Image (cartoon, helix red, strand yellow):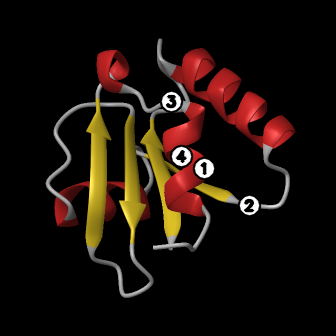
Amino acid sequence: MKVLVLYRQKSDHRQVVEDLLREYRRLHPETKIETLDLDSREGIATASLYDVTAYPSFLALRNDGSLLQLWQGQDEMPRIDDISYYASDQL
C-alpha cells in the first residue's frame, strides 16, 4: 500500500502540503509518502489515470495500483491519522 501526493510545487498550496508532509514524517518516520509534481510528465499521466480534477490530491493506492481513497483539493486534505492508516500496509 502507498500514499501518493499530487501537487504543483510552484503553487499557492505548496506550503500547506509540505507542512503536512513534514509533520507526518516527524510523527511516522517509518513510512514513506511519495510525491509527484503535476507539471511533470509522470504527474500529468497519474492525474489522468486516476481522474484527479482538484489539487492538491492525496491518493491511497493498493500495491496493484488500484485506488482505495482519494482526497482532492485543499479543503479536503486528509488528516495525519488517515494518511498513516493507508500508508501502513495493514489493509
Please provide percent x and percent y for residue 51.
Answer: 14, 54
Residue 47 visible somewhere in the drawing? yes
Q: Nearer the viewer, residue 86 or 25?
A: 86
Please provide percent x and percent y for residue 18.
Answer: 66, 28
Image marks 1 and 2: residues in contact by CB distance under 8 Å: yes
Position of the C terminus by quadrant: bottom left
Tag of residue 83: 4
SS at mark 4 in the image: helix
Residue position for label 3? 79
Image marks 1 and 4: residues in contact by CB distance under 8 Å: yes
Marked residue nearer the N-terminal end (4 or 2): 2
Q: CA distance from mark 3 to mark 1?
A: 9 Å
Please provide percent x and percent y for residue 7.
Answer: 45, 37
Looking at this view, name the residue that lies furthest to the front. 90
Q: Classify mark 4: residues with Cα within 10 Å, few (<14), some (14-19) or many (20+).
A: many
Residue at image point 40% right, 59% down = 60
Residue type at tag 4: Ile
Residue at image point 27% right, 67% down = 67
Question: Is residue 78 shown above or below 40?
Answer: above
Residue position for label 1? 84
Residue type at tag 1: Ser
Image marks 3 and 4: residues in contact by CB distance under 8 Å: yes
Residue position for label 2? 31
Residue at image point 39% right, 32% down = 56
Marked residue nearer the N-terminal end (1 or 2): 2
Marked residue nearer the N-terminal end (3 or 1): 3
Marked residue nearer the N-terminal end (3 or 2): 2
Q: CA distance from mark 3 to mark 2?
A: 15 Å
Residue type at tag 3: Arg
The quarter of the picture where residue 16 lies is top right
